[in-house]
Image (tube, grey):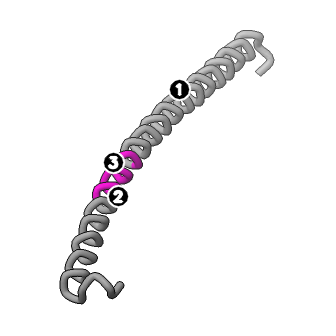
Amino acid sequence: MNEPQVWTVIGVFATALFAMLGITVTLFSRMLKSEIGSVRAEIGSLRNEMNSRFDAVNAKIDHIDRDVQFLMRREFGENHS
């Protein structure tokens, strides 16, 4: 254990280990940020689609309300609300 070559090999292996660990953590964090960005984009498009469908349902409800009011006026006369 006193040979300088042994300590050099230990140092090289330790350096290689920390370098690989650093590269792995960096690549993983970049990949994770990319995936989170794509999930946010999917949620944004889902939100837009849901809002458009809710608007369509609200329009249908407004039409039904108008038709029901028309039928009520026709059935019970103009004076009753």
Q: From the image, state whether disc 1 or disc 2 is nearer to you.
A: 2
Q: Residue drawn 80% across and 17% down?
A: 2
Q: Secondary structure at mark 3?
A: helix
Q: Where the C terminus falls, by quadrant? A: bottom left
53 and 25: which one is in front?
53
Residue position for label 2 = 54
Quadrant in the rendering for residue 11: top right
Q: From the image, state whether disc 2 or disc 3 is nearer to you.
A: 2
Magenta: main secondary structure equals helix
Q: Residue drawn 33% across and 62% down?
A: 58
Residue position for label 3 = 49
Q: Is residue 69 above or below residue 39?
A: below
Residue 38 shown in magenta: no
11 and 18: which one is in front?
18
Closer to the chain start, of discs 2 and 3, is 3
Residue position for label 1 = 27
56 and 26: which one is in front?
56
> Residue 10: where, in percent of width, then height?
69, 20
> Residue 50: where, in percent of width, then height?
35, 53
Of the residues shown, which amino acid type is indicated by label 1? Leu
C-alpha gap between disc 1 and disc 3: 33 Å
Residue 48 shown in magenta: yes
Q: Which mark is residue 4?
A: none
In this view, the residue farthest toward the front is: 79
Q: Which residues are magenta?
A: 47-56
Horizontal relation, residue 50 to residue 66: left or right: right
Of the residues shown, which amino acid type is indicated by label 2? Phe
Q: From the image, state whether disc 1 or disc 3 is nearer to you.
A: 3
Of the residues shown, which amino acid type is indicated by label 3? Glu
